[in-house]
Amino acid sequence: MKSTNRAILLLLLILGFNSCTVANVKRQMENQVLSYELSMPQPTTHYFEVKMKLDLNQTKEISENYVDFKMAAWTPGSYLIREYAKNVEGFSAKSENGALELQKVSKNTWRVFTKGNQHIEVNYRVYAYELTVRTSHLDDSHGYANGACVFMFVPQLMKTKSILKVIPHETFEKVSVALPEIAKNTFEVEDFDTLVDSPIEIGNQDIIEFETMGVKHTIANYSLQKLNYDKKELVADYKKVVEASASVIGGPHPCKNYLFIVHHLPGIGGGLEHLNSTTCQTSPQAYDSRDRYIGFLGLIAHEYFHLWNVKRLRPVALGPFDYENENYTNMLWVSEGFTSFYQNDILRRAGLIDETKMFSQIAYGIASIENSFGNKVQSVTESSWDAWIKYYRPNENSNNSTVSYYTKGGVLANVLNMIIIGETKGEKSLDDVLRLLYKEKYLASNVGFSDAEFKSACEQIAGKDLSELFENKIYGTQTLDYAQYFNNVDADITIEPSTPNTPWVGITVRNKIVTRVDRGSGAYDFGINVNDEILKVDGKTFYEIEDFTKNKEVGKTIKVEVKRSGVIKEYNIPLRENPTQRVSIRSRKSDDPLAIKKYSKWMHL
Ligand SMILES: [Zn+2]
């Protein structure tokens, strides 16, 4: 056979296959209860257009003479009520017999009266002009659609399969989403949770693909400028990170495909985890220096590790979700804090950072919480529970009244790891706690763990009752016994005043305006307020923060003149000793084989 004939045959085969697939997809769409269409005819206006089609013949779930269409109030992974319905406009509904009556029955619910019609179509627009990992964005450079803020749900159909068709603007060539593609830009969606958990990047993003552990990984890089990386090196480093992440829990990889959507723009940052994908945001300069690049790979490690910790292995409250209300849990210190610990631990396993860098990261976490006044006011479990009203809504008093479940959770992950390594003589680590829960809760029945089950798993692996630690230091605010824990892994920790006998006034000032007053300081106890304008210190015009303490001693009092609501006031402020502590960690490098074994387990030697 000649090559031209072969080519024609091949073409016929492709055409035959395609027409067959198209027919299948068409049939599948016709028998579908629910389908979504996402289009963006005019990206410059920042409006996505959504069409939802509902075939009531195909479901027995809806018996009322109306259907409620609802917009989520928040998106999993970012624990704040964001009221996505605020961006919706132009909601309309029709059937084959014309427009249907509708009523807005709550801030996020549109009720459509079906009047015996079986085929319902609703259309609405969503304003999308906020480029964060938990919102949506559309302009002439790309579209980024986050399920929770774009797609409505019907409460009776949360578990129903649907089809999503994306119609990119004519200037956009690519659609990146971690959903099975059944026809060009048409995707199969398992249920509403999956739709929310599958952010979509639409545009001309740079696509990089690699395969490891039997999973196809895709990186979709969005940037307005050329990025300074070598593709080969980038893939090699991503591979190291994802393989080291997978080694924590071990076993078969739970994903078929995985997608990294990476936005590069000045002034953006952070990441959001999803079931089979993540969205990460970073600066276009992320690849320019080793430090920045390692920081970026830490973000990749963090979000990728979440595909196990929180997306699958999770506290009971975190899936299935209530999309309209707060979902409370004490355990974000495990879901986020442990992930923060592991992001560095994974870089260490991957050989991307050395022991010294690990020590400095661990010391930085401990110093952050020990120097936070809120650490003695709020426990890490309260911090988790109140994320909705505190962590995501910080104010000028947050450092006095709250502790970060990310930072303290990371410190506690390291503490529990050191306890387990010590108690098991270097045989086990925190990995084994996660492996146990992953097997018993997620793999066995895809349910979340309770507070008690989490503590019990730690105790089972450590072979020790951990009630004192949990009651007083995790559910309470007592100081951790650091020296004892570090002793377990043949290391020493030093916590000491960073500037002994140095006077401290206890305020933060920006352009002469007080932005923060520290609990326990002279300023806090003797009258300086946030928003005061500092005019004079001891009769001299105030220029910079050093004016409070320069050539002064601990125990002395200074006169501070401030302007508050247009009125000038004077306060006598005692200078106290600066309470800031510095933390350093040192390995002992003992000769004892057991000490070496424990240290090696801790530092992955
Ligand atoms: Zn996280």
Image (cartoon, rainbow, N blue to C red):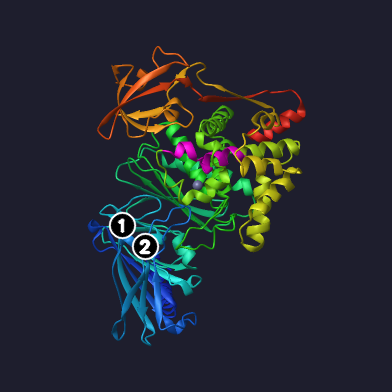
> Magenta segment, which residues?
397-413
Q: What's the amino acid at mark 2?
A: Val
Q: Is residue 259 visible?
A: no
Q: Is residue 533 left or right of residue 423?
A: left
On the image, numbered disc 2 is attached to which residue?
150
Relative to 250, residue 125 above or below: below
What is the secondary structure assignment of the residue under circle 2? helix
Residue drawn 76% across the image and 43% down it: 464
Dominant secondary-structure state across the stretch colored magenta: helix
Q: Is residue 304 left or right of residue 420?
A: left
| Spot occupied by residue 449 in the image (x, y as percentages of width and height) | 63, 56
Residue 186 colored in magenta in the image: no
Q: What's the amino acid at mark 1?
A: Ala
What is the secondary structure assignment of the residue under circle 1? loop
On the image, numbered disc 1 is attached to which residue?
128
Q: Is residue 367 visible?
A: yes
Work out whether mark 1 precedes mark 2 in sequence or the reverse, and give the earlier one.
1
